[in-house]
Image: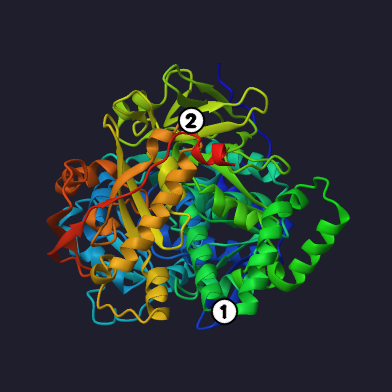
Amino acid sequence: MNTVPTQVDGPQSVPALLHRNAKEFADAPAYREKEYGIWQSWTWAETLEEVEALALGLVDLGVQEGDFIAVIGRNRPRLYWAMIAAEMVGAVPVPLYQDAVAEEMAYVLSHCGARFVIVGDQEQVDKVIEIGDQLPSFEQMIYLDPRGLRKYDHSKLHQYTHVQDAGRAKRDELLPEITARQAKLNYDSTCVMLYTSGTTGKPKGVVLSNRNVIETSKSSSEFDDLRQTDSILAYLPMAWVGDFIFSVGQALWTGFCTNCPESAETMHTDLREIGPTYYFAPPRVFETQLTNVMIRMEDAGRFKKWLFDYFMAHARRVGPDILDGQPVNQWDRFKYNIGELAIYGPLKNTLGFSRIRVGYTAGEAIGPEIFDFFRSLGINLKQLYGQTEATVFITAQPDGEVRSDTVGVTCPGVELKIAENGEVFYRSPGVFVEYFKNPESTADTKDAEGWVATGDAGFIEEDTGHLRIIDRAKDVGKMADGSLFAPKYAENKLKFFPNILEAVVFGNGRDECTAFINIDLTAVGNWAERNNIGYASYQELARHPQVMGMIQEHVEEVNASVAEDVMLSGCQVHRFVVLHKELDADDGELTRTRKVRRRIIEEKYADIIAALYDGSPEVSTVTEVTYEDGRKGSISATLEVRVAAVHPVGARMAAQ
């Protein structure tokens, strides 16, 4: 059965949507960018002129239909325009992670055979030049920021605005060619190619069509009543499918404004200035924001901290019900309104969340405590479940049906089924076309009927239709006694504590669970400063006896919570170490989207894992690290193995 419609009305490509918006919303803001502390704005009519000028310039440079054009840099309107212009000339845009090291870029650029590369600044130019001899297809590079590039060889280098100027100069000559190429675009034309994060191997190029992008953008916008008057802050990696759908797909479908911050350092300030109405962040962003809030409250005066704790306790009790329109007595509503004036309102304003109408988190499971904290403030934060191969949306939470333990119901046009082994399968108009140059993986992932294997284990609640994800199917296992092992369950509870940045739990096939812990340097460093504890490095702070004791308290509190779940009580952590370094994407331990690469960690730290299970009180280790400039080095450390108290199943519930 094929759920994808064959006949469609309206624009059938992303460039066609841009033309529509330039007519219907001509003078409405389309993109904003903060540069040198000043917000610059472009209307939809101005955006079309900028994109068309670049498209003409690309044709003048020799871009052919079917070429691949890589786009690398931070979120900037001109780089979004570059992706639209690429499709306008019949090419395929391929955004890359800007923080990827040169070796990672070499694989993607070589795999897709990019002839042209459009980058943000000198840093990205240098990376591409460094790997140029590995890129037989590479011909020309276009850059936005000219600073530092004056003395470079410009035989293959072109400034972005100069390419546009050349296009404008030859408009009359080249416009018929551009028009003809756009006329060929339809629902089945390739819109973008996005590479997966590569948690289990080399990244795969996911080919998404205009049908995938437009149908998904349309249905998801209608699901949440997104409007032309909404606005978002585009700060997540442009190579990530979520940013493409929010900042390109939904933005073009609804006509809302996409705002680009000045830099990563000013992002939170820019967030407050824009006050977006539609917001997305992965769990780690919310974890960091909560950590910063807790740090500030630790530094606050006694009365202010008491006031915060008092009203937050009330907010956790009644806030979500008020947000969902559930019955709440008048006294509780009055007290919540007082809290809004004194605590919740100022806090939301500080975070930049005062105007949020729809907020989402996804990417990996968010800790229930973190999720409930933000909803208790009156922020309409919801969860969605998706992946690159689905053009993001598989399930989402409708207003009034928001829970921390599910990822919602099927999105419009999506079908779900659960395999006998618990793996989740779906099909929808958003299902990807193929993995580029990888028919074997395409066939393994998507069957002849269009069903796609997610790789996640979960189940659908019979009474509500909500999907619950347990963990990655490959990570869910059994303890030696047959009880269920789902590491994410315990890891997310551990990461609720501001002092814990990352946690990796082990235990599949074992008698007991153990864990690696990364401390949050900001939170623990602030605590150390308040307690007059000196330290010279992350490693020194991580092994401080008081820090170790504090982390042990957190682990044991999580164990008490995990013990309440009969099905997952075996995931209590018996022993743990606080690692001597932060897990890092540059070291291959995390993906560029900050997901843990478990297999690599298990191989790299096999000596530490062995010590966790053989009863050793400590373990000495040497670890290879990658510095910011790409050089390799190593650090050595002796880690203390801590034993944590565990609890019988249902212990806390019985005590209550």
Q: Mark yes or no: residue 483 visible.
A: yes
As shown in the figure, which amino acid type bears the numbered disc 2? Val
Classify residue 556 as left or right of residue 352.
left
- Mark 1 or 2, nearer chain start: 1
* Farthest residue, direction front: 655
Q: Residues within 10 Å of mark 2 (few under 14, many from 20)?
A: few
Instruction: Read off the residue under disc 1.
Output: 300
Q: Nearer the viewer, mark 1 or mark 2?
A: 2
Helix, strand or loop at disc 1? loop
Instruction: Read off the residue under disc 2.
Output: 566
Helix, strand or loop at disc 2? loop
In this view, 474 is above or below 393: above
* Residue in the foreground of this view, choosing between 141 and 216: 216
* Residue in the foreground of this view, choosing between 76 and 61: 76
* Residue in the foreground of this view, choosing between 481 and 214: 481
Where does the C terminus fall, quadrant-wise?
A: top right
Task: Give residue 270's position: percent from left, percent from top.
Answer: 56, 74
* Residue in the foreground of this view, choosing between 1 and 461: 461
> Tell me, what colour scheme is on the image?
rainbow
